[in-house]
Image: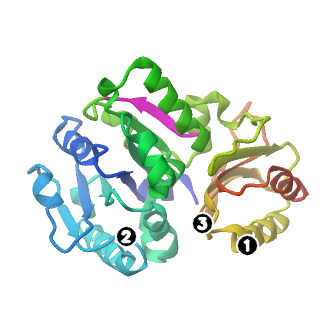
Amino acid sequence: MSASQTQDQVPVTVLTGYLGAGKTTLLNRILTEQHGRKYAVVVNEFGELGIDNDLVVDTDEEVFEMNNGCICCTVRGDLIRIVGGLMKRRDRFDGIIIETTGLANPAPVAQTFFVDDDVRARTRLDAIVTVVDAKHLPARLADSHEAADQIAFADVIVLNKTDLVTPAELEAVEARIREINRFAVIHRADHGNVPVTQLLDQGAFDLERVLARVPEFLTDDAHEHNDDVTSLSFSVEEDLDAEKFNAWIGALLAEQGQDLLRTKGILAYKGDDRRFAFQAVHMIADGGYIGPWRPGEKRESRIVFIGRNLNRPRLRRGFEACRA
């Protein structure tokens, strides 16, 4: 994918978080803050009777409500139609924000921007932003796998309600988040008071930008966590064979896709001087070239897995076997 094509695509931010974490408060802050940009908002609600639309403040933004359902296979068609309708008014907004229901797994939302060719050509998934309740997260992780999944999928985490916990509790909660997803950028907040510039237009699927903010992003952990969701990363200095990588990752996603919540990487293919960005949500993958390697930049391939039942030696061997 060329840089100009990427610029033409509308950035999409998926806003997720468990019930009561403070998503609507954060969304209202985004919509009322003076940041000079306009956003189309899609509110996804669980239940027949939609009220989130009434909770979202009156603004110039366009609010579309998707009733009755987590955004999954049945509602994905609605989302595709809404995005298609929005694109007819492309000149009226700078980006799209999708707020999911608090019970939703973000995966099907993210997958929507891979599976439909028209949507994929005209939009790009900029980041998944997850709002976390600092006070109640330990209880939610104990009784709801959705809470862990929302953290695992996140590119950016708003650790909210920090005013309700002690410094020691806050450190413990943040450590727990890091066990699930050590790659997301964490912003501490109360009442969702995070600058919009740190939430929107993050280019969070661009590993280069992530590395600029989190230099230890690809530091390999020497130990395994026993927790349900873990994150692993690998790097290879030699160029990769594109056919070998495609065959390996295709087989891996087909076999383990349900356990692989997020996969993303920057790859150096033999015979090509451009960086290839790869990403997948469960079994659905996407990728494209994102411009040349920068002067002085180390040319190597890096990949990140976030999911369940990750076998470090097997994943490492598989990735290294893709070398040209």
First in sequence, mark 1 or 3: give its number: 1
Part of the protein shown in magenta? 183-189
Which residue corresponds to the image point at 80% horizontal and 63% vertical from the top-left?
245
Q: CA distance from mark 1 to mark 2?
A: 24 Å
Residue at image coords 83%, 55%: 319
Name the disc covering residue 71, or none.
2
| Secondary-structure class at tag 3 | loop
Residue drawn at the location 85% of the way across and 42% of the way down: 237
User: Would residue 11 be visible to someone looking at this image?
Assistant: yes
- Residue at the top extreme of this rendering: 167
First in sequence: mark 3 or mark 2?
A: 2
Disc 2 marks a residue whose amino acid type is Ile
Quadrant into which the N terminus falls: bottom right
Query: Which SS class for mark 2?
Result: loop
| Quarter holding residue 279 | bottom right
Q: CA distance from mark 3 to mark 2?
A: 15 Å
List the residue tagged with mark 3: 282
The location of residue 194, given as percent across then percent down, is 32, 31
Residue annotated with mark 1: 255
Is residue 185 in the magenta section? Answer: yes
* Amino acid at pointer 3: His
Circle 1 — which element? helix
Q: Amino acid at mark 1?
A: Glu
Question: For residue 272, which quarter of the picture?
Answer: bottom right
